[in-house]
Image (cartoon, grey):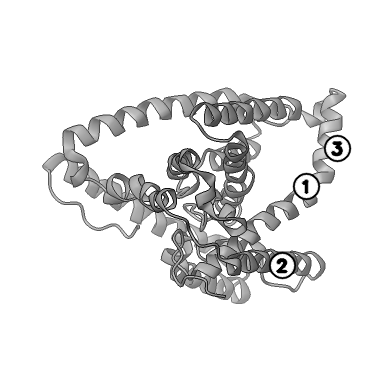
Amino acid sequence: FGIPHSAAHAASADFVATQTAGVYIILVGLMAYTAWTRVRRVWRLQAQGAPEAANTLMSFRSATACLAIALVGLAACWTYAGGHPALGLLEFGLYLFVQAIIMARATAEAGTPMTEGSFTPLDILGYFTSRSRLGAANLTLFAFSDTLFSRDLRGIVLTGFLDGQKLADGVGLARRKLLAVMVGAIIFAIIVGGALHIWLPYHQGAVTMYSYVYSANSIQFWRENQPLIVSEDQYNLGKLVAFFSGAALCIFLGLMRRHYLWWPLHPLGAALSVSWILCVFWFPMLVAWLLKTAITRYGGLKLYVKLRPVFLGLIFGEFSMAVLWTIVSWIFGTGVPVFPWP
């Protein structure tokens, strides 16, 4: 099909990364289809004021209104900056309703310690049309938004929302009481994080700090989009074929998982198959799976419960040492030992 070998935004062949984009979109559709009956029921009960439907961060009506205001605001900002509002809605729509949902699920349900996608909304646009046709203003805005949002989702707010509600359920705390705390935490994080990202580079020198943040990711999309502004890019039909083949794969996996209890493959695995987290941690995950399988098969649930603190201790021990030696290095100005993280 003439698809390039290396993907721009994934550690894989380009056609595989393109397939995962199709998996993402269909997987969100499958999630919405599965949840629709419950969502409709809760919405009806909330409209009636039923107390059993009140255990949500906010009412569905309020959440929908806030989401609409956010999307209108994003489209207005995109338009004011010189772009087309439809492209702004497409950019943030794909980010909010596709990438963020799947990545949050990957952390909250599958247990991955970080999140990162394998494509951007601009990549999906490129499956259907030449990206050069979008114009300089839109490509500049895509460079801004892809850098800030859709490229490297190592931490996203939605994950904290899901984990926080799960913890609240475990201790019997009403979810509505979390909303003000979460909003306050977001505001606090923006203020502190913003101040640190101004103070640290000017006092320590950005070129001496983590190179990915200050000299790679921050300029990646300017380098990628600049050639699209000055010259026409070549449209590749093969990517569209790969995109729809990924969608078909997700439909197949979803149907098999829904109808056959013995089916072992989850569509979320296909979505994450070329995510950076799996490229880095696939072998530890394999070892953990083999150990868990052996323990549960030959020792049963009792042995599994007894041994679980041992494996949690390994995790806490590694991260504790990373924090300890970082503090020591900060105090004495020495080099930090290499921590096995990208």
Check disc 1 and report the residue beneath it.
35
* Residue 90 shown left or right of residue 219 in the figure: right
Q: Sequence order check: which comes first, mark 1 or mark 2?
A: 1
**Amino acid carrying mark 2 in the image:** Ala
Residue located 36% across and 32% down the image = 193
* Residue 260 shown left or right of residue 110 in the figure: right
Q: Quadrant of residue 159?
A: top right
| Mark sitting on residue 248 | 2
Where does residue 109 sit, x and y in percent of width and height? Answer: 61, 53
* Residue 87 shown left or right of residue 223 in the figure: right
Q: Quadrant of residue 263?
A: bottom right
Q: Secondary structure at mark 2?
A: helix
Residue located 45% across and 56% down the image = 312
Q: Sequence order check: which comes first, mark 2 or mark 3?
A: 3
Where does residue 40 sit, x and y in percent of width and height? Answer: 84, 38
Where does residue 186 sit, x and y in percent of width and height? Answer: 48, 29
Between 73 and 152, the one nearer to me in the picture? 73
| Mark sitting on residue 63 | none
**Amino acid carrying mark 1 in the image:** Ala
Image vertical order of residue 220 relative to residue 86, above or below? below
